[in-house]
Image (cartoon, rainbow, N blue to C red):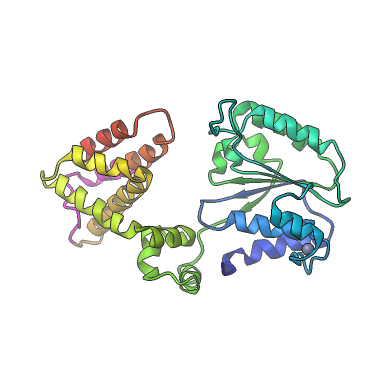
Amino acid sequence: MTARPWHADAWTRLQARRERDALPHALLLAGPAGLGKRDFLAAFVNGLLCQHPAAGVACGTCRGCQLLAAGTHPDLITLSFGLRKDGVTRSEIVVDQIRDLSQRLSMASQFGGWQVVTIDPADAMNAAAANALLKTLEEPTPSTLLALVADEPARLPATIRSRCQRIDFLVPSREAALDWLRAEGVQDAPAALEAAGGNPGMARAWAAGGALKQRGEVRHDLKALAAGRGDAMEVVKRWQAADPSRYLWFAAQAATDELRARASGKAAPLDSQLDDEALDGWYGKANRARDALRGPLRADLILIELLAAWR
Ligand SMILES: [Zn+2]
């Protein structure tokens, strides 16, 4: 993994605070998946718990680093989705996990240094868990750092957000992203980056996962349906079978590209029958459908409704 140039500023600022002994009690690392929030956090936490760090970077060889590498450092608590009694992984972080956490934090750090808690994905805490965490945030323990990671920070209560020092991860410039993708050995980096809306981490994953082919497939499907050809049920089945949320991402992107082509007087690639306003509405609908996939509705019903509005 090559260092991500778009992390440099946030890294420098955070290290400067550490050197001044002015680290906040709680951090919120916020921004879309694919920008390296988790790698950033891991590097920072490793530096905090390392016994011989150099300018905040872990040495990789001390006892602390060995325990971190083995995932058994006693002063690092990682909170994520737990298991239900029947062994199934939960889809939210629940209040019992936060209560256990407060109990553990009431004990001193074992190595006499920092105690670090990561909560990831923090935006998956349910309301009771978030409430319980608020108490922990309001009564911080010295030498304890809570780090929350959220792809969708807006889903966190404002009361939680306001008590954290926020580090925003933004989509970097096209040049920085392309440089990084090329250093990572990604083939056809510009096409992958365009498909991923400028998000380099997503572009890397998608270039490896055949997403570019999927992007072409979506455009082909939408064009056929707009022309009254193609079988919507067959499309639904295909989109549903493999990563429907990515199909919907590409569908929304296709709608934007269609609008952009019209606005610049070029031939619109999909020949959509919808007027500009309806097309813009359909773009929103595709994005909402992507969110809805996380909810209780059946994916095929969500897709059928969306495609019905296309024609
Ligand atoms: Zn070390």
The residue lying at 76 percent from left, 50 percent from top is 73
Q: Observer-nearest residue: 72 or 53?
A: 72
Q: Is residue 311 visible?
A: no
The residue lying at 57 percent from left, 36 percent from top is 124
* Residue 38 occupies quadrant: bottom right
The residue lying at 74 percent from left, 65 percent from top is 60
The residue lying at 80 percent from left, 63 percent from top is 62
Using the image, determine if residue 91 lies above or below residue 274: above
Image region (quadrant) for ligand 1: bottom right
Locate residue 31, reporting x and y percent. 55, 51
Q: Observer-nearest residue: 242 or 269?
A: 242
Q: Is residue 291 left or right of residue 30?
A: left
Does residue 269 show up magenta in the picture? yes
Q: Observer-nearest residue: 269 or 125?
A: 125
Using the image, determine if residue 189 lies above or below residue 126: below
Q: Observer-nearest residue: 49 or 202?
A: 49
